[in-house]
Amino acid sequence: MRTNFNLPRLIGLFLLCFSVTAFAQDTQTKKSIGDAVYQEYKQNGTDSALKTYSQLKSKTGEYNLTEWELNRIGYQIMMDDKDLVSAEKIFSLNMKEYPQAANPRDSYADYLIEKGDPEGAKKYLKESIAIAEKSDNEDEQTRILQGSKAKLAQLENKHKQLNFLVGNWSLNSTNFTNGVEAGKNTGTDEVVYDEASSLITINHKNSNGEITAKRMMVYDPIDEGYDMAYINTLAPMGIETSFIKINEVGDNKLELMETYNNQKGEKKKMKHEINKNDTNKLDWVIFEPGAKGQEWKKVYAMKMEKKN
């Protein structure tokens, strides 16, 4: 599922397909209550359609009764008929009919996003996530949980937590060995954000403007952090991957905890501290675990200043 504000349309189409395939066997022997309700909506309006649902749902042997029936026509009314008022009534009814299900809340959030109420949508996405995380249903544990988390991350701009880095930076860096300065370098960083993919690309350049390394980062809403790929162009070792978790630890100060596996397959950690002195200057310090992992040792420090 994509995580931009066109999600309701794409998700709606997906759910229409899912409903048809997932319950194809049932619909061969039972009528679709969703189709009956939608037909009544088209002929006599929403209130009459809701009455029809109440009348037909008691006929469990005749009609297919699942959360996906109302869910499907809710999206159909919202997307095809452009009737947000009626769609809200259908989605609201689905939550009432299936209070222990995650997807009706996720769908109601889609309605609120379509309506232009992202703040209201957050509440229902959080409820969907809470239900899905505790669910024994595989679909809720996977697809619904992933979709709700992705949309919530989008609404909360979690995928843009590092966008303050976008731009061109001059930097003065210092290497440390056992806490002692071991060398200094100058260079530049070119940081680009791609809106379509939410991808941050960092080109590390030396003083001659040559790219020496490249980092690519994208937000992972499921694990709530950034997946990162690193390529060293001077000493090619393939693509090195890691995961970064971000915490705000003070005013204009971030702590990034990076985890990765070394060439032996051992899990390792690095800590990054970023102090944003102002909009155009920041200090970035990198630490590695000390003896027995009980203390952090400074290994690299950068003073960065934005050039544009």
Image (cartoon, rainbow, N blue to C red):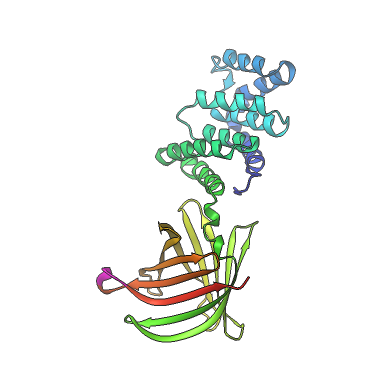
Image position, residue 175 (x, y; %): 41, 82
Residue 294 on the magenta segment: yes
Image position, residue 10 (x, y; %): 66, 43
- In the shown orientation, is residue 303 left or right of residue 15? left
Image position, residue 241 (x, y; %): 48, 68
* Residue at 62% across, 58% down: 197
Front residue of 276 and 121: 276
- Quadrant of the image occupied by residue 39: top right
- Quadrant of the image occupied by residue 147: top right
- In the shown orientation, is residue 219 left or right of residue 6? left
* Residue at 46% across, 36% down: 127
Task: Residue 288: tell me if it is visible.
Answer: yes
Q: Which residues are magenta?
A: 292-296
Front residue of 25 and 154: 154
* Furthest residue toward front: 278
Q: Is residue 61 above or below residue 224?
A: above
Front residue of 262 and 232: 232
* Residue at 54% across, 73% down: 305
Image position, residue 50 (x, y; %): 62, 17
